[in-house]
Image (spheres, rainbow, N blue to C red):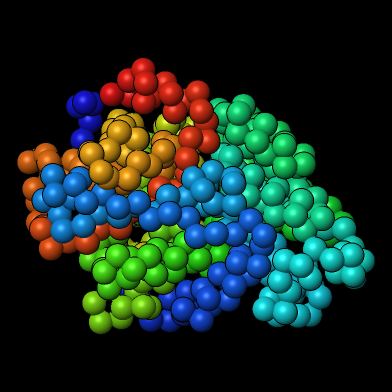
Amino acid sequence: MGSEKAKWQLNTLPKTDPQDCIKILSRQQVEKARAFHASFPQYSRTPLARLGNMAKRLGLGGLYVKDESYRFGLNAFKVLGGSYAVGRYIAQKLGRDISELDFEKITSRQVKDELGDTTFFTATDGNHGRGVAWAARQLKQKAVVYMPKGSSQSRLESIRNEGAQVTIEDMNYDDAVRLAAQNAAKTTNGIVVQDTAWEGYTEIPTWIMQGYGTMALEALEQLKENGVERPTHIFVQAGVGSLAAAVQGFFSGMFPDRPPKLTVVEPNRVDCFYRSAVAGDGVPRAVTGDFHTIMAGLACGEPNIIGWEILKNHCAAFVSTPDWMAAKGMRVLAVPLKLDDKVISGESGAVTAGLLYEIMMNPYYEDLKRSLELDEDSQVLLFSTEGNTDPEKFRSIVWDGENE
């Protein structure tokens, strides 16, 4: 195993308005998003993998992994946010509520004639862009996608296969976001659909986070079907923080008196939330430069400002992890203990599993384990946010031992 260790910071940040910031992720709002998703012919709940024997080995009461490799046939969760944001935007342009526009209506010739042509711009390492491209194609619209330098060619081809115009640009993710916003502003009926928020750009990121809520709601229902009323602990990976904040906001709203302890997990080379937590003043920090990490989906240096408000008010801890922990998580999930469910998880999807394993098995993390109160009574929920979206990279890590 790698010698690099994870670093952590418990959440001691000053609190602002804990209840107000999570209203956007109320059960009512998330139910509305799930109803929209459920109207798609491709919709079905993704599996909740049960790792009971792994839980025993680690000294936990239960371990569950939401497997997003089955989402809409796209091998990743991101389409939940992109599709809902595109749907909400179309509904808003037509002066209707999204609840009036299910898949059949929103893809009808009548709606297309009423709306006209729209081009959705976005920046992505792969999964979000493919989700936006897929949603645009389903809804008979166009998509333009910019990928940061170092992006995988196979992920680019997956986006192109959804009918989008896609290029790999010589810039990092955050600069690609700016390029998407600039070009959308220059285009007639152009709109940027990005899962990060900045000053003056918050409505669409809010819709995207609500779309991610579908996954959290499904997971809660599935836990209850397994006899678990609520998870005691959740580990969620963060790039810009939209997913982590969506999960945090939903579960904090569902269990206001005893919310699950949520830990935010990032790559140690692009750990803007961890650095912001260490700074301790409540002001988000950015990471700049080139982002060299195998966790391409998490290589984002500037926090979503809406997500930051939710996480600083509610999460338990921030952890900065080395790449080898993501590789470890991929192997642990792909080759489970006997009778446990198998999960094919990509680099960004598996890092929480690798970290949890280390926290429970490595004495170095005893203080973190104790602070989080992880023990034999803990019911832990993880989200495997992507499958093998870069198949060659997946095999290189799992078969050939890259990043051990």
Identify the residue shown where x is 34% and y is 74%. Answer: 252
Query: Is the residue 52 above or below the residue 262 in the image?
Result: above
Asked whether 210 or 205 is in front, the reply is: 210
The reply, left or right, for residue 257 in relation to residue 124 is: left
**Residue 208 x/y as whole percent:** 57, 62
Q: Quadrant of the N terminus?
A: top left
Identify the residue shown where x is 48% and y is 35%. Answer: 388
**Residue 17 x/y as whole percent:** 37, 79
Identify the residue shown where x is 21% and y is 57%. Answer: 62
Do we see residue 136 in this rendering?
yes
Q: Quadrant of the C terminus?
A: top left
Query: Is the residue 73 above or below the residue 4 in the image?
Result: below
Do we see residue 303 in this rendering?
no
The reply, left or right, for residue 100 in relation to residue 310 is: right
Asked whether 369 or 15 is in front, the reply is: 369
**Residue 279 x/y as whole percent:** 29, 55
The reply, left or right, for residue 214 in relation to residue 311 is: right
**Residue 369 x/y as whole percent:** 13, 53
Query: Is the residue 218 above or below the residue 97 in the image?
Result: above
Q: How many marks?
A: 0
- Which residue occupies the extreme front position in the image? 339
- Which residue occupies the extreme right position in the image? 113
